[in-house]
Image: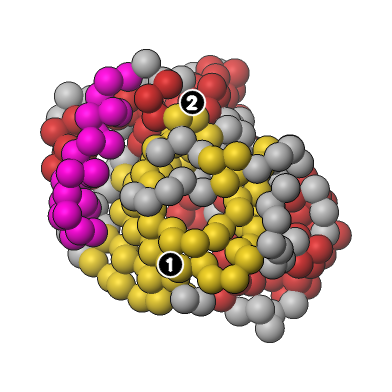
Amino acid sequence: MSRQDHQVAGVIVQEARPSPSLRTVVRGYRERTAEAGGPGFIIPLPGRPAQFLEIYLDAPLLVSLDGGAFSPAAEAVVVGPSSRHRARLFVTGRVATFHIEFEPTGFHRLFGISMPQLVDIATPSDSLGSRVIDDLVSAVRLAPDFAARARAADDWLAHRLARSRPAEAVDNIARLIRRTMGAPSVALLAQRLEISPRQLQRRFNEQVGLPLKLYARTVRFDAVLRAREKRPDISWTELAHCYGYFDQAHLLRDAHSFTGMAPTAFEQESLTMSDPS
């Protein structure tokens, strides 16, 4: 595994890539630690393609769904891809999380769970009826530091992958969309695979969670937000052109779909506050 550590806005981020044999199912491991002084702050979460297992090493974050009251998350949660802005996180005090991000079909391949049931929600890992996920969480928690946690997760997942189904066409298509931010023709893909467009859509939805075209849109919009975070001086018009939108109005439509507001307003929603209620 390769490893990288850095610090962003007071948050210490440690990252490691999975072993080569796991890279069709796991995107990487990440641990964030921080001490949020003062009253704390809110992080709004947009619709996004990521699917991951998040393990809280200290107290869980507070979460609000659909504008409701904030309440503690479970100690370990599975988060599926999201099609809209549902959740806000309230961050205060010490934060320490270990995060395993999966490739688009990785969680389905490893655990055999139908992905539509995980869309737009964060599910306590112990509520999915899978003891093997609990075993993975335990293996991570028993390790003393990030390097050991990443190795423990990598070893556990490699053993699990050896008993999982091999990669197939849908896996490759989903990873290609994630890498290229493209939206391929469903009809053309189905023709190449010698299946019907309906079969392709059904299999993609089962293994990824979102319909193929919607998933591709979340991938592109997520890339725009990440680029803006790295370079806030870049205008939304420039980003629209860089990421293949017809024009800024096209980007604004996706922003409303995935955040419920204009992109600038979504940026400004992160605010400091003393009372999360």
Residue 239, image x, y percentages: 69, 70
Q: Residue at x 21, y 64 (%)?
A: 2
Q: Residue at x 50, y 55 (%)?
A: 180
Near-viewer residue (230 or 224): 230
Q: What element carries label 2?
A: helix
**In the rendered image, which residue does mark 1 sit on?**
34
Q: Which residue is drawn at 72% across and 47% down?
A: 277
> Residue 48 lies in magenta, yes or no?
no
Seen in the image, is 15 located left or right of residue 47?
left
Q: Is the magenta stretch mostly helix, strand or loop?
A: helix
Amino acid type shown at disc 1 = Ala
> Residue 146 lies in magenta, yes or no?
yes
Q: Residue furthest right?
A: 249
Residue segment shown in magenta: 130-153
Residue 27, image x, y percentages: 35, 50
**In the rendered image, which residue does mark 2 sit on?**
115
> On screen, 200 above or below 159?
above
Seen in the image, is 135 located left or right of residue 255?
left
Q: Earlier in the sequence, mark 1 or mark 2?
A: 1
